[in-house]
Amino acid sequence: MKTYIIAFLTCGLMITATSCKKFLDLKPLDSYVENSFYNDEKGLQGGLISCYDALQTDSLYGNHFLTLGELRGDNLIDNDPGSGAGVRNQIEVFSETSANNILAGVWMGSYRAVYRSNIILDRAPAISMSETTKNQIIGQAKFIRALSYFNLIRLWGSVPLVLKVQKTEEARQNTRATAAQVYQQVIDDLTDAAIKLPSFWPDAQRGRATNYAASALLGKVYLYQKRFDLAVTALQPVVAAIYAGTIIGTVPQTSTFPNNLKTSKDVIFAVQYLAGGLKEFVHQDNRYRNNNNTNIISIPQALFEATDNRKGLVGITGTGGRPGKFNAPQANNETSSDFPVLRCAEVLLMYAEALNEVSYGDTESFKAFNAVRSNAGISVKTAAVLTSQSEFRTAVYLERRLELALEADRWFDIVRTNQMNVIFPGIPAFRSIYPVPQVEIDNINNKSGYQNPGYN
């Protein structure tokens, strides 16, 4: 499959990744290749860096994944349809085709992360080293692979499930696994990762995936599958740790965004960046900067209550401005603004949602829900106000929109909660997922049924 084999021969086998994180002092050398690099612990650690690095790129959390997760929804508007040949505007107005290069970039970027993770998982078992360290490396690779596949499912539904390093001709034979098959692999990876990973890392290695990150993502996966009882079970230990507040915990958003994403207890896992590094920064334009009306924040301010401390972080920006949530200092257009993937506040909202779906009126669901509201500086809600399961559900959905605004979850929430036909009436249901990039289909031997229905 040329889209992720040929690309990976340059991006994966010849490791060029460095990283913004302190723990990435191990810098892979671009003279190493797969067969000579992954033969000892140092090689594995260097290869693991490249897995994290894959998440940083403009294809994923550096730019394009945000377009697919936010611009498609109702928090953001692109009023410059001619910019970039219109590919961003196509995403917003539901006119994208399989030729859209943003889609191709995210597809290839996601499989780049999968490919690099597979190398680690293929080589690690045979390498002589501390079993604890080896398990931690395996756990991190499985977390990154699981996150990548979770995103691929949310974007495209059925996708190829690649669990080993492939040669080009093998990859050309790939077919699309069902979403259920891919979900099961994600669950398996996260379950094992949660066992192998520690609850925290020393400060010098802060930024690596932890068992809290694996459990939080596992709970989110179950939420998407509507397996609410399992979501509750997966999230319980994370919620307990949040309430304890020792390692992770809620803090007001204004204490996290935009300048303390690297140290905030609220952040369970983030893709990290470093201004002044070797391609480790994120360009300020890629944090929702308003350039000629390309990023107009469209979240109605009236949705926020008067004392809500989150309101100002997502206010409308003028030309050249970035929303407060991501308005970290920049120099030469470089910013070290991390991108949060999992936060404590979201875990509490997922926990509240899952408990409510299992049974309305659970005191723990109100406790988790109100912990987020109190953290935002607004009044709590009681059963006297939210008198039914339906009312509680609606309240959680709104709270998710306000709490996670611009964090690349809004479009997926709209689809997951069956609100697409209400928020975007007249848009055909097949556009709840994206078309498979044509460049991918062109490199597959068996093209039959490879494209998502509606895009043929």
Image: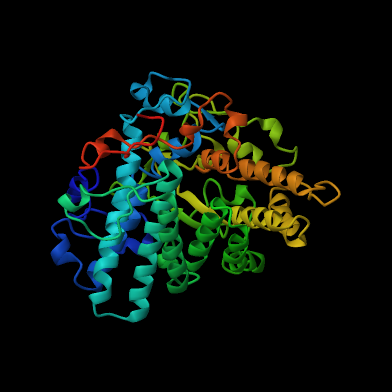
Residue 39 shown left or right of residue 228 in the figure: left
Give the x, y percent position of residue 9. Answer: 17, 50
Identify which residue is drawn at 53% across, 33% down.
73
The one nearer the camera, 221 or 400, is 221
User: Which one is in front, 385 or 168?
Assistant: 168
- The quarter of the picture where residue 80 lies is top left
Does residue 87 appear to the left or right of 394 in the view shown?
Answer: left
Task: Find the residue positioned furthest to the right.
Answer: 384
Apparent side of residue 199 relative to residue 158 in the rendered image (left or right): right
Q: Quadrant of the C terminus?
A: top left
In-image side of 302 versus 316 (left or right):
right
Confirm whether residue 14 shows in the render: yes
Q: Position of residue 42 (x, y in %)?
A: 24, 70
> What residue is rendered at 35% in x and 41% in y?
106
Q: Position of residue 249 (x, y in %)?
A: 61, 61
At horizontal 50% and vertical 36% (from top left) the residue drawn is: 70
Residue 4, position as x, y percentages in the image = 24, 47
How has the structure been colored for display? rainbow
Q: How many numbered circles does the render carry?
A: 0
Quarter where residue 443 is shown:
top left
Please say whether residue 280 is visible from this viewpoint: no
Which quadrant holds the N terminus? top left
